Image (tube, coloured by chain):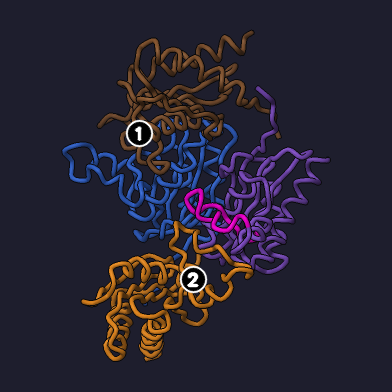
Chain colours: A purple, B blue, C orange, D brown
Amino acid sequence: MKMVPRLTLADAQVIMQACVRKAREIAVDMDIAITDDAGHLLLFQRMDNARITSIDIAMGKSFTASAARKSTRAYGEVSVPGKPAFGINTSNQGRFSIVAGGLPLFLHEQIIGGIGCSSGTPDQDEIVAQAGVEAFQAYVIN
Amino acid sequence: MKMVPRLTLADAQVIMQACVRKAREIAVDMDIAITDDAGHLLLFQRMDNARITSIDIAMGKSFTASAARKSTRAYGEVSVPGKPAFGINTSNQGRFSIVAGGLPLFLHEQIIGGIGCSSGTPDQDEIVAQAGVEAFQAYVIN
Amino acid sequence: MKMVPRLTLADAQVIMQACVRKAREIAVDMDIAITDDAGHLLLFQRMDNARITSIDIAMGKSFTASAARKSTRAYGEVSVPGKPAFGINTSNQGRFSIVAGGLPLFLHEQIIGGIGCSSGTPDQDEIVAQAGVEAFQAYVIN
Amino acid sequence: MKMVPRLTLADAQVIMQACVRKAREIAVDMDIAITDDAGHLLLFQRMDNARITSIDIAMGKSFTASAARKSTRAYGEVSVPGKPAFGINTSNQGRFSIVAGGLPLFLHEQIIGGIGCSSGTPDQDEIVAQAGVEAFQAYVIN
């Protein structure tokens, strides 16, 4: 047995708030999902103009970032044809996302969870997720 | 074309707050899902001790209550062997829930959305969902 | 709560008629799906020689166009290898279509629904869907 | 953030050994799955004469016992027609098992994981899982 840190709902709420603030700042309504280190959903929010299809995509990004412990952008880069992970996105019932916008949450190199955003361009999605990562780090340090 | 009312995120947050308050009152951590009139997820929250399996169950209850416009308890009653809806729970990729804890949200007999709770007994789940229905009604009237 | 317009079956029938007329004109039997703004099926028709596999594809195209509020061709363009949405088509249980032939229906920039056609080449499919979009616009104006 | 205990592979191997020993003792080859507290597979073993269909069933039992924190037998009892959880087994993509043979692993009332066995009668399956639970408890105390 080993002891591992686990994200609480209170932690997730801090992260969500920061994501929503950033989404408003860049003026793109988002679907935002936060998962624990096992990839299970902890908190989800759909802003009023976020896309319906992005509900599932945000969850997939968050699942992937936390359960695979890597950004979905990084997976995207090794998943183009000819690269070693090409085709990996059909695994895990299609929930393995290779589109940018999913970021893992680490605490001293230990995986803690993930954030997945969707509804803007993948770059916008990642900016919103990144705001959540930074809020988490600031919150944990303090 | 016709005009229909649609639940906003702000509405869902009022509902969620009431559900969480009731869950704390009865001391059972819950997975709580709120869906729009189409059955699509708007807001989801997993309280710290809520069950992992109940993430999907809460979503299924909320989906069913909103998209079928009936409580999941009512479906449960007509879905026992020999009753007309027996077996209906395998439809919609198994998301059609017949376990109590899913309640529809109506506004002047028009479906608006649904609430699905899971992690307690089905009776407890429904009490928490009911608190959300009542908060919604009070909120809409005022 | 906010008020949103919703496609009725009568609206969908006007759209379907225009699609079928165009499919006959170009002499390609089609599977044609019309969805509401939530991506849920409202009307579906398989012409006698339409492909069996295109039942699902037409539904996927229509679902995507309405629920993501963009043509499936536009998604196809940003989903080739190296482009930011590459891999997005495995999301939403594989229903996210990136093949041309799915078009959204807008009313004053508000999403109303979508049309998905399949059985011809993607270009033919889109021509048939486009006929539906135009009929919808003419019908709504009058 | 909170700290939680997590099952290691070494822990799971101790449990598996005890299950296999019991399966041999009662002379029924089994599929045996061990999951962590999130319901994710940690160790799986198919004995030579175990059923193919039981690969999935053992995983479902173990998933359910750990992620819902209750034995699958207990769920079976409340899931017969007329009981409150009837129909719950279609949730979680059909992975929610209500057939005896899945047992949770607790450490001081904290969920640690689950064991799922299948291939014999449900009673035999549970006997084998129980041997794993007891080995885990003895191992943890020492």
Residue C46: x and y in percent read 25, 73
**Taken as a whole, is the magenta stretch helix, strand or loop?**
loop
In space, the residues marked 2 and 1 are separated at their CA atoms by 37 Å
Q: Is residue D7 visible?
A: no
Quarter residue C38 falls in: bottom left
Residue C106: x and y in percent read 47, 79
Quarter residue D126 falls in: top left
Q: Label 2 belongs to which residue? A: C98
Name the kind of residue labelled 2 in the image: Ile
Secondary structure at numbered mark 1: loop
Which is nearer the eye, D131 or B97? Answer: D131
Task: Residue at 40%, 88% (x, y): give it.
Answer: C134
For mark 1, name the chain. D
Q: Is residue C83 left or right of residue B37?
A: right
Label annotation for residue B138? none
Q: Is residue B133 visible?
A: yes
Q: Is residue A66 magenta?
A: no
Q: Looking at the picture, do discs 2 and 1 lie on one chain?
A: no
Which is nearer the eye, D122 or A24? Answer: D122
Q: Is residue A100 magenta?
A: yes
Residue A11: x and y in percent read 69, 42
Label annotation for residue D52? 1
Residue interval drawn in magenta = A84-101
Above or below, B23 against D137 in this view is below
Above or below, D8 against A84 in this view is above
Q: Quadrant of the N terminus of chain B?
A: bottom left
